[in-house]
Image (cartoon, rainbow, N blue to C red):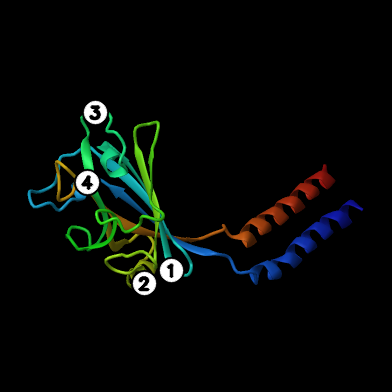
């Protein structure tokens, strides 16, 4: 009976693999960026701001929505969020954009998060307890972007994993109007959810091994 149970577990699990393989998964392409002053190509040279930031982005499978979440430390976003400014000596953020150009070059604004405000329907600003600020939203085909996402998406999808895209994020401030920190967006493609086939295979093999160990012991 124990041998029969082990065989049934393995056979049943393996029998599910073809049906799961035919079930389409929602594919997303992920991107990331690290923002700092060293990447700025300002008229006066690299800025000396200690501010930093990171961004994670996700392009949906239809390439109609680019979700973004940008976390920044060392810059005051109260003016952009239209809230009272805290008593601190931080530089004040004035603009935040997606630009199009390779690393080391300046390019035009293709989508304005702040100034112009081209993501008013999805954009949120969160002031975190650790002092950082998170700006999140969705750039979609209905947004009045300077350049439509439909023109940008093919280039994003064509970017090899780990390589630069031709998009970068640039945060402008009162002290550095040309840009205080900048981050080139890098492609990191994966599919979500994580491979169901792989997880099932591991689970089936693990279940069989566990039963086998029990029988042997």
From the image, state whether disc 1 or disc 3 is nearer to you: 3
Q: Which residue corresponds to the image point at 18% horizontal and 57% vertical from the top-left?
A: 104
Question: SS for tag 4?
Answer: strand
Of 27 and 97, which appears nearest the observer?
A: 97
Q: Is residue 182 visible?
A: no
User: Which of pointers 1 and 4 lies earlier in the amino acid sequence?
Assistant: 1
What residue is disc 4 on? 94
User: Which of pointers 2 and 4 lies earlier in the amino acid sequence?
Assistant: 4
What residue is disc 2 on? 150
Q: Which residue corresponds to the image point at 28% horizontal and 68% vertical from the top-left?
A: 147
Q: Residues within 10 Å of mark 4 (few under 14, many from 20)?
A: many
User: Which of pointers 4 and 3 lies earlier in the amino acid sequence?
Assistant: 3
| Side of 84 relative to 191 (left or right) | left
Quick one: quadrant of the C terminus? Answer: top right
User: Which of pointers 1 and 2 lies earlier in the amino acid sequence?
Assistant: 1
Q: Label 4, label 3: how many angstroms apart (C-alpha)? A: 16 Å
Question: SS for tag 3?
Answer: loop
Give residue 133's position: percent from left, percent from top.
Answer: 34, 39
Q: Residues within 10 Å of mark 1 (few under 14, many from 20)?
A: some
What residue is disc 1 on? 63
Q: Label 1, label 3: how many angstroms apart (C-alpha)? A: 41 Å
């Amino acid at each position: 009976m124990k041998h029969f149970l082990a065989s049934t577990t393995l056979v049943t699990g393996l029998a599910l693999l073809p049906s799961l393989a035919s079930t389409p998964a929602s594919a997303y392409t992920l991107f990331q960026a690290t923002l700092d002053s060293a990447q700025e190509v300002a008229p006066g040279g690299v800025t000396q701001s200690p501010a930093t930031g990171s961004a994670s982005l996700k392009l949906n499978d239809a390439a109609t929505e680019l979700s973004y979440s940008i976390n920044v430390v060392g810059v005051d976003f109260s003016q952009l969020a239209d809230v009272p400014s805290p008593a601190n000596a931080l530089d004040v953020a004035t603009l935040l954009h997606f630009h199009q150009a390779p690393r080391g070059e300046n390019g035009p604004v293709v989508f304005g998060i702040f100034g112009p405000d081209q993501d008013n329907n999805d954009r949120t600003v969160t002031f975190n307890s650790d002092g950082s600020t998170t700006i999140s939203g969705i750039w979609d085909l209905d947004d009045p972007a300077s350049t439509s996402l439909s023109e940008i998406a093919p280039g994003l999808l064509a970017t090899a994993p780990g390589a630069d895209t031709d998009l970068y994020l640039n945060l402008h401030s009162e002290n550095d109007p040309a840009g205080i920190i900048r981050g080139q967006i890098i492609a990191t493609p994966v599919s979500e959810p994580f491979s169901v086939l792989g997880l099932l295979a591991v689970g089936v093999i693990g279940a069989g091994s566990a039963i086998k160990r029990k029988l042997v012991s």
